[in-house]
Image: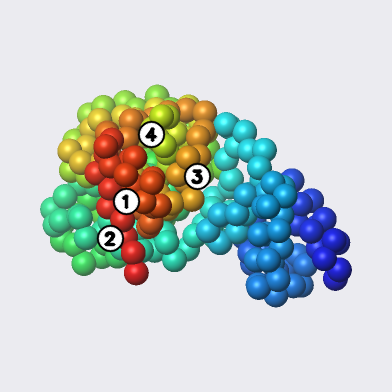
């Protein structure tokens, strides 16, 4: 396939999907991984897309844009795994912890099986099912189910959480920076995240570095409200953010 046609296909697919992995583009164009990487570099230089770990996203993303769970699960996989593995080391026996619907948070679940008398509270249907598979004691909060994230939200969820005390909370985010804090597209999910953080003795945000300087519609926390667990930040980003929150960088 000639280069111009391949670029056209990439941009057409990105327009409808908003976020694509490199493997998505390999299947779409029958090109090699190295060719796709060169394509993405070229198209980013022309400001036609933004490269992220494991793929690319559209440049004209709106504040309310929200990729589906299946799309998010395929992005930044090595980084997410490292972050999740580190997060698990913070959990102790006999604790009550909250896991939200974040795809990085989900990767903590297989690593939790060694802990004794652990109770997990979650508003994620997918995570609740996975926790059951690993026979981890779990409470899944009932409420209105959001199709995009498979998370429950609404008054019932908030009422239950108001009567809970959590040792630790592990949360995902769609974006973070020093001005807007932690943000997510949906106000209902934002309300749940905010309350969970208030109800927890210690809250952590699990976010790979591609989320830095991304902003979505609804702010659910200031940077100071939770510790940040991430894979790697530039020196400039680290120096700026460390004034607002504790940062734990997880590197190979």
Instruction: Report the residue marked by disc 1.
Output: 229
Number of other residues with Cα within 10 Å of mark 2, as a class: few under 14, some 14 to 19, many 20 or more: some
Question: What residue is drawn where x is 18% and y is 43%?
Answer: 167
Asked whether the beta carbons under mark 2 and mark 1 sit within 8 Å of each other, the answer is: yes
Query: Helix, strand or loop at disc 1?
Result: strand
Question: What residue is drawn where x is 70% and y is 71%?
Answer: 35
Mark with earlier residue (3, 1): 3
Number of other residues with Cα within 10 Å of mark 1, as a class: few under 14, some 14 to 19, many 20 or more: many
The residues bearing labels 4 and 2 have C-alpha atoms spaced at a distance of 23 Å
Corner quadrant of residue 162: top left
Q: Is residue 191 left or right of residue 98?
A: right
The residues bearing labels 2 and 1 have C-alpha atoms spaced at a distance of 8 Å
Mark in the foreground, 3 or 1: 1
Mark with earlier residue (4, 3): 3
Instruction: Report the residue marked by disc 2.
Output: 86
Number of other residues with Cα within 10 Å of mark 4, as a class: few under 14, some 14 to 19, many 20 or more: some
Query: Helix, strand or loop at disc 2?
Result: helix
Query: Does residue 130 lie above or below 222 as drawn?
Result: below
Mark in the foreground, 2 or 3: 2
Coordinates of residue 62 in the picture (x, y in percent): 62, 33
Mark with earlier residue (4, 2): 2
Instruction: Report the residue marked by disc 3.
Output: 150
User: Could you say which disc has been placed on residue 118 in the image?
Assistant: none
Query: Helix, strand or loop at disc 3?
Result: loop
Corner quadrant of residue 203: top left
Query: Does residue 225 lie above or below 82 as drawn?
Result: above
Coordinates of residue 82 in the picture (x, y in percent): 36, 63
Asked whether the beta carbons under mark 4 and mark 1 sit within 8 Å of each other, the answer is: no
Viewer-side residue, 149 vs 22: 22
Instruction: Report the residue marked by disc 4.
Output: 178
Question: What residue is drawn where x is 53% and y is 58%?
Answer: 53
The residues bearing labels 4 and 3 have C-alpha atoms spaced at a distance of 28 Å
């Amino acid at each position: 396939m000639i280069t111009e046609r391949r670029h056209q296909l990439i941009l057409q697919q990105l327009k409808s999907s908003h976020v694509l992995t490199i493997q998505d583009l390999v299947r779409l164009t029958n090109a090699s991984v190295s060719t796709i990487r060169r394509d993405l570099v070229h198209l980013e230089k022309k400001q036609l897309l933004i490269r992220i770990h494991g793929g690319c996203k559209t440049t004209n993303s709106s504040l309310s844009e929200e990729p589906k769970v299946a799309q998010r699960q395929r992005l930044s996989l090595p980084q997410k795994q490292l972050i999740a593995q580190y997060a698990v080391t913070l959990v102790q026996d006999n604790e009550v912890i909250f896991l939200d619907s974040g795809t990085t948070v989900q990767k903590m679940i297989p690593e939790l099986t060694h802990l004794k008398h652990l109770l997990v509270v979650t508003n994620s249907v997918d995570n609740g099912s996975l926790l059951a598979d690993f026979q981890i004691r779990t409470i899944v909060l009932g409420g209105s189910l959001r199709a995009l994230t498979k998370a429950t939200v609404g008054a019932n969820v908030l009422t239950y959480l108001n009567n809970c005390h959590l040792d630790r909370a592990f949360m995902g985010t769609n974006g973070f920076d020093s001005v807007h804090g932690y943000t997510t597209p949906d106000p209902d999910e934002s309300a749940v995240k905010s309350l969970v953080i208030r109800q927890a003795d210690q809250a952590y945000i699990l976010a790979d570095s591609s989320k830095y300087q991304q902003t979505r519609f609804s702010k659910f926390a200031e940077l100071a409200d939770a510790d940040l667990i991430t894979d790697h930040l530039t020196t400039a980003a680290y120096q700026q953010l460390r004034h607002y929150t504790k940062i734990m960088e997880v590197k190979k």
